[in-house]
Image: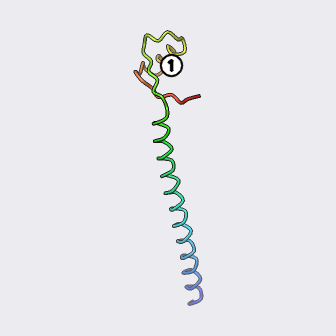
Amino acid sequence: MLLLLFFFQRELDTTATELAAKQDESDAARKKLVEQSRDFKKNTPEVCFTQSASSPIMHSVNSVYGNYDCRVLSKS
């Protein structure tokens, strides 16, 4: 019985250590994503288009998305 308890405690400790490591990785990945999102927003030009846009593509986009005033588009 004591041996079984020792085994379960060791497994629990190992699992807790693995979970803590995964959480640290997750926190680091989330911080990196936030930083990349900020950089993207800062470095991406804002492109405005209106209902009177002359491009047929812009007319299509406006009709689908409800004539938004401005949208941030990525640099291609």
Front-most of residues 21 and 5: 21
Element under disc 1 = helix
Q: Position of residue 71 (x, y in %)?
A: 45, 26
Residue sitting at x 56%, y 85%: 6
The residue at which mark 1 appears reads as 61
- Residue 20's place in the image compared with 37, above or below, is below
Q: Position of residue 52 (x, y in %)?
A: 43, 10
Q: Choose top left, top right, bottom left or bottom right for residue 4.
A: bottom right
Q: Quadrant of the N terminus?
A: bottom right
Residue sitting at x 43%, y 20%: 66
Residue sitting at x 59%, y 28%: 76
Question: What type is the residue that disc 1 sits on?
Answer: Val
- Residue 50's place in the image compared with 11, above or below, is above
Front-most of residues 20 and 70: 70
Front-most of residues 37 and 63: 37
Q: Residue furthest bottom?
A: 2
